[in-house]
Amino acid sequence: MIVLGIDPGTASMGYGIIDVKKSELKLVSFGCINTTKDTPTPDRLKILYKKISELIKKCRPDILSIEQIFFFKNSKTVISVAQARGIAILAAANSGLPVQEYTPLQVKQAVVGYGLAQKQQVQKMVKTILKLKEIPQPDDAADALAIAICAGHCPAAIDSLKIKK
């Protein structure tokens, strides 16, 4: 099963792609799709949609996993993150790709075993689980890999593929 994990954002959308075979998880690719703050919002969303669609077409994942908006401190930020989430989910839907959504708590629980883990702990476990030499950079890409790992460990994600196929 190929899992595409997405850490949504309009300035920087992290993505992480892993291959899950039984209980073994292997890194396929990771990175960020970046837009500039002086680009109008509709154009930023168009760029994100196009790049995610291209990534789906190129990597042919079996499922897209994405972080839910759990809480926020800044209403302006939550709106842009929600827009980015919508774009990624739309790209998946238009490609016929099932989507699994996870809270930050679920991601931390799946990766670290503790739902209140610190960001640094999650990043170290991503490195360990995927047998990498270094913590993936930038942070958005490491977060996307954590989200992909969560789906790779989640029976609901695997069950949704059985239903679809």
Image: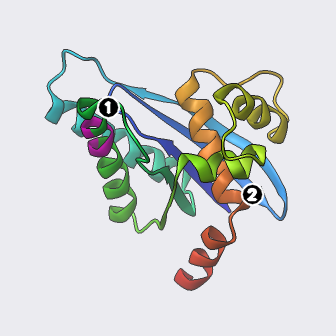
* Residue drawn at the location 62% of the way across and 31% of the way down: 142
Comes first in the chain, label 1 or label 2: 1
Question: Can residue 144 be seen in this snapshot?
Answer: yes
Instruction: Please name the residue shown 32% across and 63% down the image.
Output: 94
Is 73 in front, or is 55? Answer: 73
Q: Residue at x 34, y 25 (%)?
A: 11
Quarter occupied by residue 132: top right
Per the rendered image, the range of residues in magenta is: 79-83
Residue 10 marker: 1
Q: Position of residue 87 (x, y in %)?
A: 30, 48
Q: What's the residue type where badge 1 is placed? A: Thr
Residue situated in front as seen by the camera: 19 or 100 = 100
Going by the numbered disc 2, the residue's amino acid type is Val
> Which mark is on residue 21?
none
Residue 139: x %, y % from top left: 57, 24
Q: Is residue 38 left or right of residue 15?
A: left
Label 2: few (<14), some (14–19) or many (≥20) C-alpha neighbours in 10 Å: some
Of residue 24 and residue 68, the one placed in the foreground of this image is 68
**What sort of colour scheme is used for the picture?**
rainbow
Question: Which residue is disc 2 drawn over?
Answer: 20
